[in-house]
Amino acid sequence: MPEKEPSENAFYVKLKKRGLIHLEGPDRHDFLQGLITNDIKNLTPEKPLYACLLTPQGKFLHDFFLIEGNDFTLLDCEGGERAQDFFRRLNMYKLRKDVQISIEEHNAVYAVFGAPIGIGDPRDPEMGNRTFEKPDLQEKPFEEWDINRIKLTIPDGSRDLIPEKSTMDEGRMDQLNAIDYDKGCYIGQELTARMHYRGLGKKHLQTVALDSLPEKAELRSSCYELGLALVKA
């Protein structure tokens, strides 16, 4: 079937503060499988994955997108110091695995809406597609993407999830296709599974109006009149 043409209203947004980690080597999939919350067996060149790296206690460290290439795997992650921290932690776990890891602390990523460019966002189809190449479309400000994300109650990395403190349950990460509860062991699995199956989470991120925050809500990221806040369940 022929590719769909871009709609008249198609546009792109350049995302802020993104980095890229590049993995090569025959052990790269086995290496990642023992670390991340999702099942890398489901990763294909046509199907990216969304996943997280946790502490041994099941607390959030990093979220990222996995993209499969020709004999390499890319991790589209937060940039700058956050990318450096992610890179350091991956190298700490590498041990004797035959995997080579490199980093680009700053990498351009574009979110595309209304055009068949890039690959779909695995968290929610309403988040559009993602691409590393600047599209030949109308550009809109970052806030266009940000307010859409907040309306969908999708956390944006460490803007909404506090490293070494937040849990997957707080961020509703299982509803964003970040967790596979049927895969084998990974770092932080025990607490993550226990909170999920026993319903132990007492607070969750919710979309809130800034002029009517719930009592004792912890506001995280915001855009225009809306924000994401940690609210007692």
Image (tube, rainbow, N blue to C red):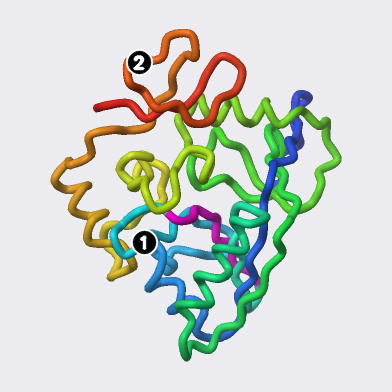
The image shows residue 132, relative to residue 101, as above or below, that is above
SS of the residue at dot 2? loop
Q: Is residue 67 magenta?
A: yes
Residue at the far top: name it: 211
Residue 128 on image: x %, y %: 61, 38
Q: Which mark is on residue 117?
A: none
Q: Residue 28 or 208: which is nearer the viewer?
A: 208
Q: Say whether residue 121 is left or right of residue 184.
A: right
Indicate which disc, 1 or 2, sits on the residue closer to the N terminus. Answer: 1
Residue plotted at (30% across, 65% down): 183
- Are the residues flagged by discs 1 and 2 in contact, CB closer than 8 Å? no
Res 103 → quadrant: bottom right
Could you say which is closer to the camera, residue 32 or residue 138?
A: 32
- Give the number of marks: 2
Q: Position of residue 191 (x, y in %)?
A: 23, 56
> In the displayed structure, would residue 63 be above or below residue 26?
above
Q: Position of residue 92 (x, y in %)?
A: 48, 77
Q: Is residue 191 left or right of residue 155?
A: left
| Mark number displayed over residue 55 | 1
The residue carrying pointer 1 sits among few (fewer than 14), some (14 to 19) or many (20 or more) residues within 10 Å by Cα, namely some
Q: Which mark is residue 214?
A: 2
> Which residue is most to the right?
136
Span highlighted in magenta in the image: 61-69
Q: Amino acid at mark 1?
A: Thr
Magenta-span inclusion, residue 64:
yes
Residue at x 33%, y 21% (from the top left corner): 216
Image quarter in which the C terminus is found: top left
Kind of residue at badge 2: Pro
